[in-house]
Amino acid sequence: MASPAPTQGSLPTVPPRPRRVAFAGTPADAVPALRALVEADREVPVVVTGEPRRRSRRGLPTPSPVAAVAAELGLSVSHDPTDLGDCDADCAVVVAYGRLISGELLAVTPMLNLHFSLLPRWRGAAPVESALLAGDDRTGVSLMALEVTLDTGPVYWRHEVPIGATDTAASLRRRLAHEGAQRLAASLTDGLGTPQPQAGEPTFAGKLTPADRRIDWTQPAVHIDRQIRVGGAWTTLGSQRFVIREATLAPSPPGSVPGTLVDDAVVTGDGLIRLRTVQPAGRAALDVASWRRGARLAQETRFDTAAQE
């Protein structure tokens, strides 16, 4: 019979100033935190990260960004999360690792999680993207004690970051990763203090699907602009799929049909999205002028809307 999952009260606590700190993370967003730990003279006995992956169909498997930097720093790299509990660390720091940590492992090693939102708002896998899509005017990074349930642990600190009108998910993640890493290192050096339970109504940020990224040109321009700034927003023209990489907002001429291409812009439900960079399926990204010259589009060309299909 399996043992019951540990409760937060039964989990080991992180010492105020841990010296020996294991690390778990995978993407580039986790790299600044790893570097900050090393620069703060923390001993990092092991770095646990995702398995090597192919970046293209014909390419060889390549290490994760965290694995590459760990090797550069001379740190031990593992793909087995149980190594976080077998390295005699004071605690482990988890940043965008990509896998849930088991209750059995949490019962052995106290863990901190650097999460890119102002908890309890946007618990889950895509907090930055969800904040952008929702039209939030601010987001942030939180340091919490990791517990069995998802992103519910008590919080040591929150650092707020404004969301600008041109911020993308990528630019926000870079800023949050950098500022969060510096605050993480400072708090481990100066003392963590006592974490406080999360207060307020939680919201949840599930992983975005292709449907979430699909553009419906009948929607308001501000909504479509947010989809594009999240990244991977797509539409279709006839049978061809397009990703809109960069665009800006512009006023709409009266009486135009949503989806209609007007010079270098597309009509939406209440305005224009002026295209800057597009990527037709199977091709490299192009500036809109180069794409239009090569495409030889007819007048009143229209992108498909969800309602048309």
Image (cartoon, rainbow, N blue to C red):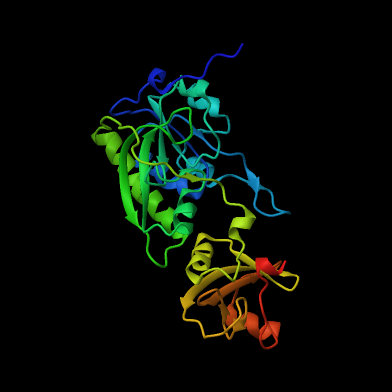
- In the displayed orientation, state which residue is furthest to the right: 239
- In the displayed orientation, state which residue is furthest to the bottom: 299
- In the displayed orientation, state which residue is furthest to the left: 190
* Location of residue 271 in the rendering, given as x and y in whole percent from the top left corner: 50, 77
Does the image show residue 41? no
Relative height, residue 136 to residue 51 (above, below): below
Residue at image x 31%, y 47%? 159
In front of the other: 275 or 238:
238
Residue 172 shown left or right of residue 285 in the figure = left
Residue 124 shown left or right of residue 200 in the figure = right
* Location of residue 36 in the rendering, given as x and y in whole percent from the top left corner: 36, 43
Q: How many marks?
A: 0
Relative height, residue 61 to residue 274 (above, below): above
* Location of residue 80 in the rendering, given as x and y in whole percent from the top left corner: 57, 29
Relative height, residue 288 to residue 35 (above, below): below
Does the image show residue 216? yes
Q: Quadrant of the N terminus?
A: top right
In front of the other: 172 or 86:
172
Residue at image x 47%, y 38%? 74
- In the displayed orientation, state which residue is furthest to the front: 255
* Quarter of image, res 99: top right
Residue 296 shown left or right of residue 142 in the figure = right
Q: Quadrant of the C terminus?
A: bottom right
* Location of residue 250 in the rendering, given as x and y in whole percent from the top left corner: 47, 79
